[in-house]
Amino acid sequence: MIDQIKTTRLPNGLTILTEHMPGLRSVTLGIWVRRGSRDESGPENGLCHFIEHALFKGTINRTAQQIAVESDRLGGHLDAYTSHEITGFSMKVVDTALPAAFDLIADMLANPRFAEDDLKREQSVIIEEMKMIEDTPDELLGELFNAAYFPDHSLGRPIEGTVETVSGFDRERTASFHSLNYSPANLVIAAAGNINHDTLVELAFKFFGQSNGHSADGRSLSSPGTAAPILIERKSELEQAHLILAAPWPSAKSEDRYIASMLATVLGGGTSSRLWQSIREERGLAYAIGAGGNTFTDVGVFTIYAGASPAHIDEVLDLSLKEVRRVVREPVAEDELQLAKQQVVSSVLLSLESSSARAGALARQEIIHGRRIAPDEIIQRVEAVTSEDMLRLAQAHFTTDTLAIGALGNLNGFVVDRSRLEI
């Protein structure tokens, strides 16, 4: 594979990345911010997500309706998201529409209006979003569990904030946070598809080149302390019981991240995985069952999630623990390892066909690693993983003292203590 990637860093710290994909007539363009809910103080909880919403409510040059009309005219693929460490805005358009798409996204990020009436309405919208989460048991359990797993830390707070914090986001607080955190040094502009790098650099310089802003080096992340909670939340009106079994995991920057990916794939990464076969296919105990790692810059969490009848939740937990103990005590068989490698490599290769996936990968790798990680390098690292590597990682991370449990639902009679989690 030959990378057709170009990078420009402006004196003010703004980074511009492009990847030319021959044969396409489309471009995915985005602006990613090196900020997320992790960067908020307690009273600011939810502010990054709130700003993500508020940027669609109008700029000094466009009304909210004009933003919506332009987005639809350009194809209607303007997406935005907020995570714990990154906020992103991206759009897929026909290549000839690149200047118009950039003008729209850049105007939203650089020149928000933040009118008080608009902010009040958006507070109501986000509070309704919170109610949706409360009515979605797997998401609700995830938030309750995060709060217990990362006590008194921003990683344990909900990305959307709380009713109390969001209700206090007035124009002054919102504009101040935006001014401090949406400076050029905190932005990564990335595009993939039929893109000319110099054209994008010219567009970026027009909007952001004259601004000095603040340094991206000003980001200060406090590493969280982690707990090993046993969290049982009874909610009798639910038909299902929802279960999380969790353990510490390598971070997004760890050299063990490729080994971790292989181990998670074997345990619960697909329909051929051990958990899926044991719990769903062989016994029919759950519709939803799987496992994976949630990784941050300096910490990671491995989770097994299952949704099952309350009558089956004990058996689902015991079977999940059985598979965890198995990878701690026995090396993964060579055929299973090869299957996991083929699964991951196929995912990497298939993502190369998507301009959206490529643009997103450019931005995330720049923000997390400060460099491009080529697909060939990823595949080589995956292929180098051994069964011994996976056994070492499992023994280091799956221990009795660090396993954690979260459960939500009609759980009368469901009891877990530390001795039950013995590895």
Image (cartoon, rainbow, N blue to C red):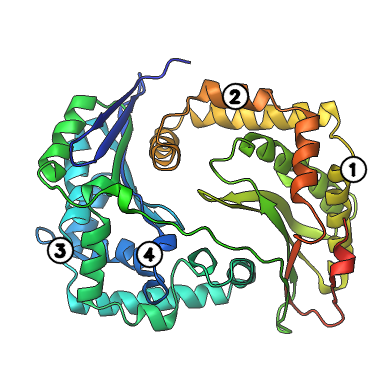
Residue 332 lies, in percent from the top left, at: 84, 34
Residue corresponding to mark 1: 329
Q: Earlier in the sequence, mark 2 or mark 1?
A: 1
For residue 63, which numbered disc appears in the image? 3
Q: Earlier in the sequence, mark 2 or mark 3?
A: 3
Tell me the kind of residue under disc 2.
Ile
Label 2 and label 3: CA atoms lie apart by 46 Å
Q: Earlier in the sequence, mark 4 or mark 3?
A: 4
At x 41%, y 78%, the residue is 127
Q: Is residue 158 above or below residue 344?
A: below
48 relative to 67 in the view: left or right? right
Q: Earlier in the sequence, mark 4 or mark 2?
A: 4
Task: State the residue lying farthest toward the top.
Answer: 2
Label 4 and label 2: CA atoms lie apart by 34 Å
**Residue 338 found in image quarter:** top right
Q: Mark 4 touching mark 3, by CB under 8 A?
A: no
At x 19%, y 32%, the residue is 201
Q: Nearer the viewer, mark 2 or mark 1?
A: 1
Label 3 and label 1: CA atoms lie apart by 61 Å
Q: Earlier in the sequence, mark 3 or mark 1?
A: 3
* Mark 4 element type: helix
Q: Mark 3 touching mark 1, by CB under 8 A?
A: no
Residue 224 lies, in percent from the top left, at: 55, 61
Residue 140 visible in this rendered orientation of the protein: yes
* Mark 2 element type: helix
Tell me the kind of residue under disc 3.
Thr
Q: Nearer the viewer, mark 3 or mark 1?
A: 1
Q: Is residue 125 above or below residue 31?
A: below
